[in-house]
Amino acid sequence: MNAPTPEHERLAEDQRREKNWKRWGPYLSERQWGTVREDYSETGDAWSYFPHDHARSRAYRWGEDGLMGFTDRECRLCFSLALWNGRDPILKERLFGLTGPQGNHGEDVKEHYYYLDSTPTHSYCKALYKYPQAAFPYEDLIAENARRSRSQPEYEIEDTGVFHESRYFDVFVEYAKNGPDDIFIRITAHNRGPDTAPLHLLPTLWFRNTWIWGCRHDGCSLKPSLWLENDIIQTRHQLFDEFGFWAGESNTGVQPEWLFTENETNTQLLYNSPSYTTHFKDAFHRRVINQEMDAVAPKPRGTKAAAWYATSIPAGESVTINLRLNALANGATAPGANLRETVFGHRIAEADLFYGGGPWTGATNEECRVVRQCYAGLLWSKQFYHYVVEDWLEGDPAQPAPPPSRQLGRNENWTHLFNRDVISMPDKWEYPWYAAWDLAFHMIPMAEIDPEFAKQQLLVFLREWYMHPNGALPAYEWNFSDVNPPVHAWASWRVYKLSAAHGQRDRDFLTRSFQKLVMNFTWWINRKDAEGRNVFAGGFLGLDNVGVFDRSRPLPNGAKLQQADGTAWMGFYCGTMLSIALELALERPAYEDLASKFFEHFIRICDAINSFQGSGLWDEEDGFYYDQMLSDHQRQPLKVRSVVGWLPIIAVELIDRDVMKKLPGFAKRARWFLENRGDLPGTISYLEDNDEDHDYLLLAMPTRERLRRTLTYVFDEEEFLSPHGLRSLSKWHQKNPYHFSFDGGISTVNYEPGESPTGIFGGNSNWRGPIWFPVNYLFIEALERYHRYYGDSFKIEYPTRSGNELTLGEIAKDISARLGSLFLRGENGQRPFDGPDWPFAEDPNFRDYALFHEYFHGETGEGLGASHQTGWTALATRCLADRIWQREHRG
């Protein structure tokens, strides 16, 4: 056991509420515009109602955004950096990207930026933004992507040529906490180009607008103020401490010019309507770029302020500016250089120490760098998220009422939902809103570095102001009623075990989770098993376009879909609930009854998928599970070989034989059920209580023989097994596309290893071939459980037809290693996620920075989809930890 580091001590102090170390963090969104929260249109077209071009001039209702910013946990006082290169038509205050309708593969951020470091308390954070010295190619990116079809690749910013000859600035922003309310900020801009180039830096401080709307709930306030006094900005807010903000001269001797304005909408510009104030949110843009002297406030007072540094940086040189945000109660004064450097030095060293032990002992420099950046992305993706559906539906008292159609539209039945928390986001630009099943996966790597935050995140989604009264969990902002896979129980169970401190597990957390999860499980049973036969159809279940058609929509002519993945997810859910109930029953025997309920239900679900109406969803000829369509009492299998067909493998649980001995009531009822269901042994793998060869009892959805037949497909390199993990659709469909007559036409499913050429569901997501971390990770865990039971008695060719037989445990390790290899240099010196044509592979100022994408090309491993979806792709840290462990223990 490694000794606690200073960062561990801060986490403990924060948990005990002795010091509020997490009060400040990188909780500022990267895109508030174009979100459902800010959409008050009649049509529900969020992208068009609040576009990027409005963001600089229009006050947000529900949040804020900025470039590499910091804010308090309720997003009251915000800090971020604005830039201007002397050529851009607008001030660079936030990241730019294409909207869903603009991109030929859906929404897509068109910037280069990287999260480089963060500790869990954000005592040290570092990020990098790469800013072109040429005019930013806004119009070119929009126009060229509009010209391209779905069959063509996206047109990226590097394709425009603005990074040619390294004519860009590397702008680093670092934060170091001297205390919970004392933050040092260091901004360093490097000119990577061959010539001297101008750069204007405007570190900006402002209050989120909580005063104009007339809202009624907690968090709304009277208008606050910022003003300059003795060269320090003072702050005053009705509901927040008073702070001082200091900005010193740059290392090149440039003194800042202070600019002030109001964080208010420029109604004259946007709507040709008079405003009650004369200074607006876009004042700094107008002052710096348009030279409008009267755009900013004549006196140093307002709700938004910036320190304007107008610099010129020679080739190969840099400029550094230092700032400090400190509670006035601390005595907010200009810091001495020695104190500043000491604080940064200590926090960086402490971050090194925090990430230097545990599972990373023995890691190579490259592995350490990848892991550190992966955790940085996970931690930087925590975001203040505010959405009160009732207020959003009804509108605010001081604003025009929303259109009547809103009361019958999006999220209208979620009026209980009140979100105002720091939440782990999938991607703060492309998905600046939570997704329930994404967050569950985020918390697995989070439990390694901040177990209390992981538990808190899982619990908050089960609270009454998140979970629907009927038991449903909110899926995601665009449609809370949509259905994500039910993985919350699995995440709670895994975090419970991962977060054990000194062998002590948090039973209170597990109990609180379980009680609410029972409600959610019941919702699934009542809502997604239409005929009560334990065969489930949950909709698209997060797998977007994997099917022949959009599975979230009703089928024509009353047809019904029976989903192999929906049924597998419910078997997986049920088995996890069984394991949790058994754990809780060890201390409270009353939980034995629930354990019996989940045991019997698991058996019934397994029986249904394997033998309902004969063969269930299993195809004996092919040896694979398929979705089936029921129409006019006819069943038609949809013979698409996809992740849908191998997901039943993950529905496997092991029951410790010692647990059975400690719970005789459960053991007796389980034995009775099996003895009176003699038809079941042929269709499922189940516990054999009289088999003393095993320390565990097995419950699994596929039989041993069906497991082997399915794995033959999964481990085939011409089907699912790629060099970098498991594909979501079999490569076999590349030469054998699946055709299906549907709704008056013919739908085709092809193997598509990269970006999707179809828009069946969503924008840029594709489940017809690429590699996805979440399902790969669940599959690896399942193989490990099977191996724990079967051991060396179960070996299989891996890869299929190779003649090389391995145990399932050995195969699990290999698939994990393949996933981890996505981020490490191979023998050719390239990192697969960069793609084979990455133009900056040899650039010393690009080559060591990693991105953690939404999914990965099924052949090359190139990163695709959202470029900063470090949430579930942070599972890579678990794969790399296993790689390090294997190497160290092999000697």
Image: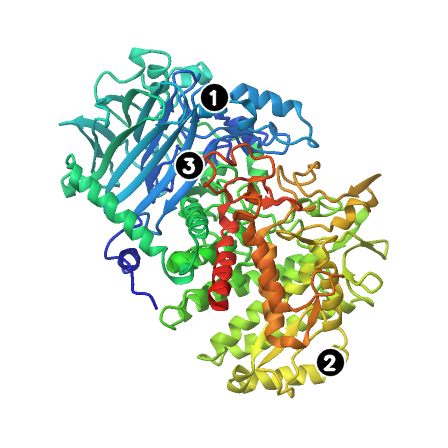
Q: Which residue is at a point 28% across and 35% down the rendered structure image?
A: 186
Q: Amino acid at mark 1?
A: Phe
Q: Considering only order in the chain, which callout, 1 or 3, is on the residue closer to the N terminus?
A: 3
The quadrant where residue 810 appears: bottom right
Instruction: From the viewer's perspective, tell me whether residue 844 is left or right of residue 636.
Output: left
Q: Which residue is at a point 53% across and 47% down the rendered structure image?
A: 825
Determine which of the numbered discs, if any, sits on residue 136 in the image: 1
Q: Give the CA distance from mark 3 to mark 2.
A: 55 Å
In the picture, which quadrant includes the N terminus? bottom left
Residue 420 position, x and y percent, is: 40, 45
Neighbourhood count class around disc 3 (C-alpha, 10 Å): few under 14, some 14–19, many 20 upward: many
Q: Which residue is at a point 50% across and 56% down the rendered structure image?
A: 880
**Foreground mark, 3 or 1?**
1
Residue picked out by circle 3: 62
Q: Considering only order in the chain, which callout, 2 or 3, is on the residue closer to the N terminus?
A: 3
Q: Amino acid at mark 2?
A: Arg
**Foreground mark, 1 or 2?**
1
Instruction: From the viewer's perspective, tell me whether residue 797 is left or right of residue 51.
Output: right
Residue picked out by circle 2: 677
Circles 1, 2 touching at the beta carbon (< 8 Å):
no
Q: Give the CA distance from mark 1 to mark 2.
A: 69 Å
Asked whether residue 486 appears in the rendered view, the answer is: no
Q: Considering only order in the chain, which callout, 2 or 1, is on the residue closer to the N terminus?
A: 1
Q: Amino acid at mark 3?
A: Trp
Q: Secondary structure at mark 3?
A: loop
Residue 562 position, x and y percent, is: 74, 57
